[in-house]
Image: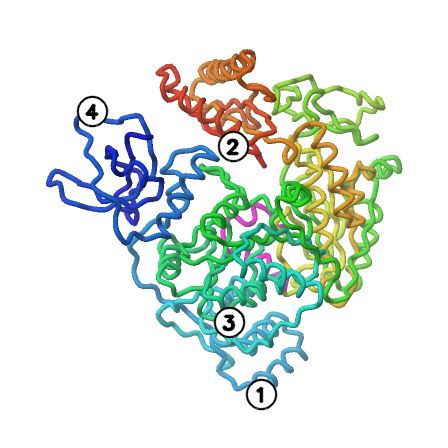
Amino acid sequence: MAEYANVIVDISHEKLDKTFQYRIPERLQEELAVGVQVEIPFGNGERKTTGYVVELTDTPEYEVAKIKEIGDVAAGSIPIESQLIALAGWMRKNYGGTMNHALKTVLPVKQKRREKKQRFVKLELSREEAQEQLALFEKKNHKARIRLLTALIEQSPLPYEVVTGKLNMTASVIRAMDEMGILCVEEKRAYRSPFGKIDRKEKPLVLNQEQQRIVDRIWQELNREQHHTYLIHGVTGSGKTAVYIELIEKVVASGKQAIVLIPEIALTYQTVVRFYQRFGERVSILNSKMSPGERYDQFERAKMGELDVMIGPRSALFTPFSNLGVIIIDEEHETSYKSETLPRYHARETAIERGRMAGASVVLGSATPSMDSYYKAEQGEYILLELEKRIEEKPLPACEIVDLREELKQGNRSILSGRLQELMEERLERRQQIMLFINRRGMAGFVSCRACGHVLKCPHCDVSLSQHAHGKMVCHYCGYEEPVPQNCPECGSKYISGFKAGTQKIEEIVKKRFPEAKVLRMDFDTTRNKEGYEKILSSFANQEADILIGTQMIVKGHDFPNVTLVGVLAADLSLFVSDFHGPERTFQLLTQAAGRAGRGKLPGEVVIQTYHPEHYGIELARQQDYKKFYETEIAYRQIMQYPPCGHMMVMLVASRDEMTASLSAELLGQKVRQSQEKGKLTGLSVIGPANAAVAKVKDIYKKVIYFKHADYQELVKIKDVLELFVSSHREFSSIMIQFDFNPMNGF
């Protein structure tokens, strides 16, 4: 039994950094756990206050005689806050970091803010007059005005930020239509709902047999208090959103609440408005553009029982619903569900734990499920439900692969293959739009031969070697290195190097080849500010440009009906990233990219350019055959014991002094290896230490060690031992350690 409890006193306060330690009286030993609300003496005057237990420990942090005793377990505590604090404790244990890191993740930080005014765009015409005006705009082909007027006929008023953001309207279009007396912009106190007044006259959804079967199965089990994790594997266009809405309707009607997680980039107006039309003011959204104060207000509304549904990226998972019924994670394969900051939690695993605590079911959905989820479904840990038919009988786009090795043989050294150029000319003549997708910004680290396609890999880890400025290639898992060869070791060709075509370079090539075409580029550089992002999307949506070039941000969640050609310029860039997820990411990205073509009435075509046309990740993406891809990829993962067939933990050791970082990493690696030699850690692989992918950031040197084991909890124990070892030895005072479990991007 623990002797002491660390207690946080006021959880709504901005400063969550401070915990206070209290002694646990014997009579409360059985009752205390992380998350329990307690009554404690506080301050010099011994005034009574309440706090939450965030950690139980045997280690006193102060002079023992000065540590006060907990008074009692508080009566009438707020169960939802207790549950979220217990969830923070679970995250701290399973992902590392401090308890304060975890608390700041799960609890909204209270901030004072001025009352907000919100602007709305309101239709000033009657429905008949608006339809007449729409016909005039259609005659003159005023595309932006057509889209705005159509949206306002469907729903008025619309929040100004929805019109400028989700509908991609510029202020000049709104001003011009205001001057014509078609609409007006009015300012009101901010509505509780981020979408203003919603028209709820949507016809009830009519589900097909497959959809209805899935809804009935989940609902019946949920109703019987049988809580499971379900994986809906549905082909693109199979109607997963309709399944979510129907299921949520049943959950809400039974008096419970629902959380819907959507990747930030896919939070489109069209997706969210369907939920609003069904649930009206009882639904809210979170997104990265909201201030902490606005986010806090939404969480307060949830706690007060004013909301039934919360939609948002991974942070929406911590909505303080007290009677949660279902958590839905759409596009569950997206890497954005894994946090890149401490604690490095995965929303999927954390949602399952929150569901367990709350007595809620978890529904995962994707056209290309993550290997982890499909593996767990195969193992019976999740329940697999499939949607095999598309709702609208729109055909998938025709997909063809171009072998860049053949292009080189024919003397074409351009990034654009002959076939792609031919199809681009055709589309430009027909005034149809084109998207060119390069799946990584800037230069890729791997080295390959352009004549035969050979990629230089680590002989120990089966990941590509990364090219570094000192003329060497390095493995970021084990530290193995070798010099960059002058000629290809496979075919002897001199065309061996890193891939150097970024989006900017491609833009120059396209403009030179098609001088008449209007070209837009969308990548990190052109979208640094919010306006850049919206301006580009707005121009392309209004058909003010013919070609859009971009990184992966252009293939997610955007619907451009006039796009009939998608070119994937370098499928290999994500195929040979220096971690084991390469083929999986490539398959998912290519499937998504293909899905951008032919979304309107016209059929679409996709050209995938690659030096590895025979690679299963590329060929099976062309065929859109997920199951075959999964079977092939899982066989490789089993051989290498990579997740999900085993578990992996990476430890980062960082210091301002390079020698300290190196020696500390060596020492910690040795400590684990010594335990292995004594037979205490069986079935463990220790790889490294090696330099991190970026070995030095802001004068801080970074080393990594990888640990592989079949049992996740064994890795958690190793983390606990290493954290304790570092905190209790003064020689490690100048280093920082962090842990990441089953890493998706590495440090």
For the residue carrying disc 1, how many other residues have a C-alpha within 10 Å: few (<14), some (14-19), or many (20+)?
few
Q: Which residue is mark 1?
A: 128
Q: Which residue is mark 2?
A: 740
Check disc 3 and give the amino acid type. Answer: Ile
Check disc 1 and give the amino acid type. Answer: Glu
Check disc 2 and give the amino acid type. Answer: Asp
Q: Which residue is mark 3?
A: 174
Q: Earlier in the sequence, mark 2 or mark 1?
A: 1
Q: Which residues are magenta?
A: 521-541
Q: Quadrant of the N terminus?
A: top left
Disc 3 versus disc 2: distance between alpha carbons? 47 Å
Q: Measuring 59% from the left and 22% from the top, which residue is drawn there?
A: 684
As helix, strand or loop, the secondary structure at mark 2 comes to strand
Q: Quadrant of residue 656?
A: top left
Q: Quadrant of residue 248?
A: bottom right
Look at the image and tell me whether residue 176 can be seen: yes
Disc 4 versus disc 3: distance between alpha carbons? 66 Å
x, y (%) of residue 387?
A: 71, 58
For the residue carrying disc 3, how many other residues have a C-alpha within 10 Å: few (<14), some (14-19), or many (20+)?
many
As helix, strand or loop, the secondary structure at mark 1 comes to helix
Q: Looking at the picture, tell me which residue is in the foreground, 318 or 378.
A: 378
